[in-house]
Every structure is written in C-alpha cells, then in structure tokens.
Amino acid sequence: MEIAVPVQDKVYRRIETISQAVLMAQANLAWQIQNSSISVPSINLFIKYNKKEVFLKINLLRFTEKPETMVAVAAKLCYSPVGVDELLDKMSEEDINKLVRFVIKSGHLSTTEHISFTFAIEGVSRALTHQLVRHRIASYNQQSQRYVSFKDNFEYIVPPKIEKDSDIREEYDKLIKDTHDLYKKLLAKGIEAEDARYLLPNASETKIIVTMNGRELLHFFTVRCCNRAQWEIRKMAINMLKQVKKIAPIVFEKAGPNCLRGPCPEGKFKCDNPPKASDFKI
Ligand SMILES: Cc1cc2nc3c(=O)[nH]c(=O)nc-3n(C[C@H](O)[C@H](O)[C@H](O)COP(=O)(O)OP(=O)(O)OC[C@H]3O[C@@H](n4cnc5c(N)ncnc54)[C@H](O)[C@@H]3O)c2cc1C
C-alpha cells in the first residue's frame, strides 16, 4: 500500500505501511495542536532532519506477576512461623494492601527487590541513556553503534528549546547533517562503524532495554522525576512511573521526587515550581 500524506511543511511524502500511516496521522495531529490555541501538555514529538518523526516510545515489556502479593509475602515471611504456601493461602487482598503500604512507609524496601519491571525504550538520545546507565542496580541492553551502521537511517533528538528557535534549529540540523555526511564518507572509505561512530552526537537516537527491581525504580523515580533532572530523562521517568503505577499502585503510590513526601533536600538547587502529586497521576 502506498499513500501520499501531507506533512508539517506541506510536502507530500510517500508512506508504505499502515503503522507509518498511523504515526503520520499522530504527527500531523500533534503539529496541528502545536500550531493552534489548544494546549496539550506532553506530546512526544521530535523532528528528524530526514523529515521523519521520532516518538519517545516506552513499552513495559514484562513485570513480576502479582507484584504486590510478592512484596507482601516477602514481608510477612520475616515475622511468620508458617511457610510461604500457607501465607499465600491465608492473605486476603486487604491484608496484602495493608502490608505493602506498611513496608513502603516504614522503609522495609528489600521486599520490593523481589519484583522487577522490564522496559523497552526507543526514541531517546544517547545523552539520556548515558544518564540512565549510571543507575547500577539494573540490567541493560542497548542498540550498538559498533554493530549497527547508521548510514541510511540516522535519527536524532531535538531538545524542545532548540526546536522552538528556528534559527538555532537550522544550524543544529545543518551541523548534524554535515556530521552524518562525514560519518557516511568514513564508512565509504572502509572505516568500521565502531570508529566512524566517534563522530556521532549525544543527540543520536537510540534504543535500550532496561530491567529494574521495585526498589531501584523507587530510587530512580526519586532522582529522575525531580525538576533537577534533565528534561528528557525526566519525561521518560514520569512515563515509566505512570506505567508501573498501573501494575503496582500501592508500591508506587508515593513514588516520585522527594518533595512529594517531605521537604526538598536540594538546598540552593531547589526549584521554584515543584511538581505536584497530580503530575504523576495515571
Ligand atoms: C540531577 C542530577 C544531576 C547529576 N549530575 C551528575 C554530574 O554532574 N556528574 C556525575 O558524574 N553524575 C551526576 N549525576 C548522576 C548521579 O551522581 C548518580 O550516578 C546517578 O543518579 C545514579 O544514582 P545512584 O548512584 O544514587 O544510584 P544507583 O546506581 O541507581 O544505585 C541505587 C542505590 O544503591 C546504592 N549503591 C549502588 N551502588 C553502590 C556502591 N557502589 N556503593 C554503595 N552503595 C551503592 C546507593 O544507595 C544508590 O543510591 C546526576 C544525577 C542527577 C539526578
């Protein structure tokens, strides 16, 4: 199937699959909204120089089945003379909820290490993943710039503040295009992708799979949902928090920056406009 659709700059571009058509429709809607008086808080739209759109995409691929039962059993076992099977039989949903709320409040967080969540993350920059992988209690697999050549399909992220300024945006795009041209030239001369990639910018789009346990996620959300965190990783962390809240609502009930639970510890770096609990509601 081939459909020609109008894109932002009124240029018609051919698209070949239904999913491309859906993406284009979303992008067009986002563009129309951006250029109208309707305000929509977070549409994850970034433009690439080859005029395709990159969307932040976060899929919660896998998670521990019945995570809150797992946390509750782990907590109950500590103080119980009976075995796990009996605990599982005896605990009502109300018991589970009460216990999970208690362990989170009391900081008995080792119990949340028994539940884990795996996310597939796409449409983010290498600048973001460099910050992400600093979190050590996690497992990662990232698209390689050694084994994948970006000769024909190089995509990059444009920070919103650069996006807004058309002059700067033009220079930004040009530098990235020139860099990519040189990258392709190196490949054409037989230089391996593993060396040609030294040119590629922090803006390069990347894909990563990350698995974190509940405790690490609580910590991750504390530091990365905070206004002190950089916009891109913050946006991603908030999206991840909203997804896990659907699966383990009590574990992640109060998750988010420190200021949701008490005074801000950031001292002189404290922000003027702290987030509200409603910002993290699903
Ligand atoms: C706003 C912000 C600004 C930042 N700026 C910088 C910067 O300028 N430069 C820079 O280098 N980094 C910076 N970072 C990264 C930061 O220093 C951490 O490396 C990153 O946030 C990972 O968090 P973490 O070390 O607390 O915990 P994780 O690696 O996520 O581990 C979780 C927790 O496990 C425990 N833990 C893990 N490993 C150890 C260990 N080896 N020994 C003892 N306890 C351990 C700690 O309690 C830790 O908090 C910044 C982070 C944020 C959020």
Image: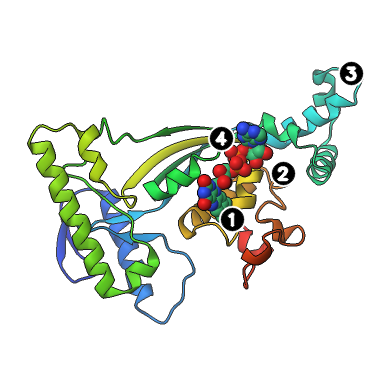
Mark nearer the N terminus (4 vs 1): 4
Identify which residue, 112 or 228, lies in the foreground. 228
Give how far across and how far down residue 46 sits, in percent: 34, 60
| Label 3 vs label 2, nearer the camera | 2
| Alpha carbons under labels 2 and 1: distance apart | 16 Å
Q: Name the residue tied to disc 3.
A: 82
The residue at label 1 has a CB less than 8 Å from ligand 1: no
Question: In the image, what residue occupies the spot 18% across and 56% down?
Answer: 177
Mark 3 or 4 closer to N-term?
3
Residue topped by disc 1: 225
Q: Is residue 68 left or right of residue 118?
A: right
The Cα atoms of the two marked residues, 3 and 4, are separated by 35 Å
Nearer-N-terminus badge (3/2): 3
Mark 3, mark 1: which one is toward the viewer?
1
SS type, badge 3: loop
| Three-letter amino acid code of the residue under disc 4 | Arg
C-alpha span from label 4 to label 1: 18 Å
Q: Residues within 10 Å of mark 4 (few under 14, many from 20)?
A: few
Q: Are marks 2 and 1 in contact (CB under 8 Å)?
A: no
Q: Mark 4 and ligand 1: say if the CB distance to the nearest ligand atom is below 8 Å.
A: yes
Which SS class for mark 1? loop
